[in-house]
Amino acid sequence: MGQLQQLSDSLEHARAQYDSANAQLAKIQRDLRENRYELRVAKSNLRVSQRAVAKRLVTLYTSDQASTLDVILGAKSLDDMINRMDSAKSVTALDTNILSQVKTFRSAVQRHGDLLAQARASQVRVVAERAAAKQSIESKINEQNSLLSSLKGQIAQLVAADQARQLQMAREAQARLAAEQRASQQQQSTTVVGVSAIAPAADTVVAPPTTHSNVANIALSQLGTPYVWAGAAPGGFDCSGLVMWAYAQVGVSLPHSSYAQYGYGVPVARDQLEPGDLVFFDGLGHVGIYIGGDQFVHAPHTGDVVKISSLDESWYAAAYVGARRIL
């Protein structure tokens, strides 16, 4: 189960990475759209400005200004010509404004081109990360499913083994109860013909012999019945509901509460337990019916069924409170 938990944590981490990559990709795609738009605008503005420069050059050329002609004819390229015009004293304020626009839009084109390239590179990287995260998720899901399948097989084997063990314990308990009942009948016959049992000392507290040992067999008939909170019928029982129902079958009315049931009957020592006695655990929060051989039948908890357990099992031994014999 620890391995399954580790896989679940790892899968959750991979899913978080995939979600993060998706969020990054969405932002990059928005940036791409914005930069493409800004780049188109900048290029359009640059073309307009360049046409204005060209038109201005024609005007300067036809005006036959010597200094301006030197600037134009001495330029080796458009960029060189723009730079020469920018530094020429003969250039007017209009020329300066046009040149400024050209430089601004050329810079915008360059900037948005760089941003677009960066966004595309980021897009490639994040898409690869997302693909890796997706592959990791699929791999972990397959691994988790495989592990679950193997665990289901193990769980099924454990359940089958426990059912077989419960069946064997039930057979042994029923045989033991039958033998004890025969022994009790023989003892009663012996007493009738004049051989009486030795009475205990006056200062010794001993619970009277049980008169409801058959309640153990009645409770055993419900082995395998699902635990149902507040249940008190063969369709489903909680712990005190099983006790209440079993005793109702022999005409004894008990409350549907383990705490209240502890107030009925008389206390009985652990080494004096007999079939039919009620055994209590966990601060009176749980109750079962003793069936002999240090075993008891009970409805443990949600997800379980009516079953046989041992008083010597670690939890029950530690949580044992006491026992009562219903008269």
Image: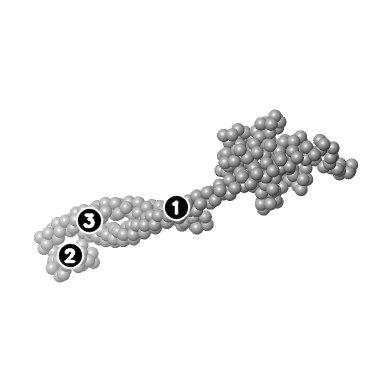
Image quadrant assignment for residue 181: top right
At mark 1, the secondary structure is helix
Q: Residue drawn 71% across and 38% down?
A: 213
Image side of residue 132 versus residue 267, left or right = left
Residue 240 visible? The answer is no
The x, y position of residue 136, in whole percent, is 39, 58
Residue 304 visible? The answer is yes
Q: Amino acid at mark 3?
A: Lys
Q: Residue drawn 55% across and 47% down?
A: 163
Tell which tag, 2 or 3, sits nearer the viewer.
3
At mark 3, the secondary structure is helix
Mark 2 nearby-residue class (10 Å; few <14, some 14–19, many ≥20):
few
Farthest residue in the right direction?
202
Q: Nearer the viewer, residue 195 or 198?
A: 195
First along the sequence among labels 2 and 3: 3
Image side of residue 242 versus residue 122, left or right = right
Determine the CA span between mark 2 and mark 1.
74 Å
Residue located beneath label 1 in the image: 149
Image side of residue 75 versus residue 128, left or right = left
The x, y position of residue 231, in whole percent, is 60, 34
Residue located beneath label 3 in the image: 43
Determine the CA span between mark 3 and mark 1.
61 Å
Residue located beneath label 2 in the image: 78
| Number of marks present in the image shown | 3
Q: Amino acid at mark 2?
A: Leu
First along the sequence among labels 2 and 1: 2
The x, y position of residue 109, in whole percent, is 25, 58
